Image (cartoon, rainbow, N blue to C red):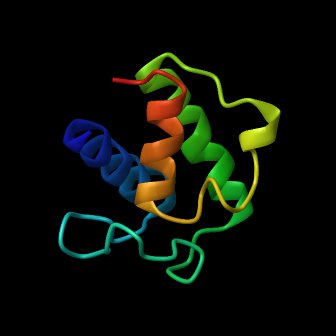
Amino acid sequence: MIEIERVVREVLTRCAGLPAGDGVLPLEGDLFAHGLTSLRAVDIMAALEERFDVEFPDEALNRETFRSVAALRDTLVGLGAG
């Protein structure tokens, strides 16, 4: 799971410009409070789908899924990423 967290943080920094490096943004830190937008969430989703060869189902396309590094990590684990 640490590898997934690392990749999620890299994608957040690259696709959304968030200071998501380890130790900068808490695992449960609210990404929207740190500047994540719905448009950037789509970019993040696409990058994570490509990196982990998964597809976010429609029911995962909500604010809760993109709420935090932990929420994204848990969603990816549930989709079989690894």
What's the residue at 24%, 76% (across, down)?
24
Quarter in which the N terminus is drawn: top left
Residue shown at 51% from the left, 76% from the top: 30
Decide: is 22 above or below 29: above
- On the image, the x and y values in percent for residue 3 come to 22, 37
Q: Is residue 54 left or right of residue 21?
A: right
Farthest residue in the top direction? 53
In this view, the residue farthest toward the bottom is 33
On the image, the x and y values in percent for residue 19 come to: 33, 71
Rendered position, 77 above or below 34: above
Residue 43 position within the rendered picture, expressed as x and y whole percent measured from the top left: 61, 45
Residue sitting farthest toward the right = 58
**Rendering quarter of residue 79:** top right
- Position of 32 with respect to 9 (left or right) is right
Picture residue at 32% right of the left edge, 66% below the top: 20
Foreground of the two, 81 or 16: 81
Instruction: Say if 52 sits above or below 20 in the image.
Output: above
Q: In the rendered image, which quarter contains the C terminus?
A: top left
Residue 18, quarter of the rendered image: bottom left
Side (left or right) of 26 relative to 39: left
Q: How many marks?
A: 0
- At x 50%, y 49%, the residue is 72
27 w.r.t. 30: above or below? above
